[in-house]
């Protein structure tokens, strides 16, 4: 939902949740050595009937996570005991390609993943992540290989993502720096999606609406 105005021209907010701030994240990283992971792989079309952001975690990568009888596929990385609580996903090139469904970042977040690291992302998926508190990080191919090596340690594959410093710290103390647009960084650090950015201007918007109502009472 977006910002709305009441009968007095005052801006009010209709929303179901506030975007969570992203500052520092420490957690297990799961390796997904697959390129061109599209949004239909992330959350198949049968899960798109809902507009709720919660409950989609069960459908995340469902075609790979589950067997035909509905049981867990033990070979899929997120079903392995060491990675069931993963908070970070290290993935192959061109992550999030395909259709523009916002359910993809919703499903990742609902599962518990708050950061995806790859060499490249599809533009729409990349921008959708920043509207939902999911941090997509672009690194070089060499750095991605280092992170895959870290992630493949299983339960010992703990990474720390420090957004303020723009660095990823590995389990052995290695540090990988990453670039990020300053505006997107500001929004993530402060938990600001499009609605949150609008509400930062609430007093100015309300003042304009009052002035406009006085000048144009017939409008």
Image: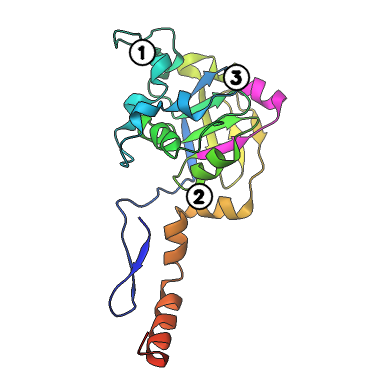
Residue at the front extreme, as displayed: 218
Point 41% across, 28% down: residue: 43
Left or right: 188 with respect to 56? right
Q: Is residue 137 magenta?
A: yes
User: Which residue bears the numbered disc 1?
Assistant: 66
Disc 2 vs disc 1: which is toward the camera?
Answer: 1
The quadrant of the picture occupied by the N terminus is bottom left
Point 35% across, 90% down: residue: 217
Marks 3/1: CA distance? Answer: 24 Å
- Evaluate whether residue 162 shows in this view: no
Disc 3 vs disc 1: which is toward the camera?
Answer: 1
- Give the residues drawn in magenta, as a range: 135-148
Q: Are circles 3 and 1 on residues that touch, CB within 8 Å?
A: no
Mark 1, Cα crowd under 10 Å, few <14 / some 14-19 / many 20+, is some
Mark 3, Cα crowd under 10 Å, few <14 / some 14-19 / many 20+, is many
Where's residue 132, x and y in %? 44, 45
User: Which residue bears the numbered disc 2?
Assistant: 188
Marks 2/1: CA distance? Answer: 33 Å
Give the SS element for disc 3.
helix
Q: Are circles 3 and 2 on residues that touch, CB within 8 Å?
A: no
- Image quadrant assignment for residue 108: top left
- Going from N to C along the chain, the mark reached first, 3 or 1, is 1
Point 62% across, 29% down: residue: 94
User: Which residue bears the numbered disc 3?
Assistant: 148
């Amino acid at each position: 939902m977006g910002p709305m105005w009441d009968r007095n021209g005052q801006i009010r907010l209709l929303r179901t949740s506030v975007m969570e701030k992203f500052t520092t994240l420490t957690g297990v990283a799961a390796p997904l050595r697959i390129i061109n992971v599209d949004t239909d792989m992330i959350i198949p079309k049968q899960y798109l009937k809902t507009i709720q952001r919660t409950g989609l975690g069960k459908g995340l990568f469902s075609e790979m996570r589950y067997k035909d009888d509905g049981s867990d596929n033990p070979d899929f990385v997120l079903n392995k005991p060491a990675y069931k609580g993963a908070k970070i996903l290290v993935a192959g090139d061109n992550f999030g390609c395909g259709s523009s469904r916002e359910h993809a970042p919703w499903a990742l977040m609902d599962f518990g993943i708050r950061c995806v690291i790859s060499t490249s992302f599809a533009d729409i998926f990349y921008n959708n992540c920043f509207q939902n508190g999911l941090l997509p990080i672009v690194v070089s191919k060499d750095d991605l290989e280092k992170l895959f090596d870290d992630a493949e340690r299983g339960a010992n594959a703990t990474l720390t993502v420090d957004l303020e410093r723009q660095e990823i710290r590995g389990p052995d103390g290695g540090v990988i720096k990453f670039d990020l647009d300053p505006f997107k960084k500001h929004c993530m650090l402060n938990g600001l999606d499009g609605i949150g950015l609008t509400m930062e201007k609430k007093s100015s918007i309300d003042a304009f609406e009052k002035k406009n109502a006085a000048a144009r009472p017939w409008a």
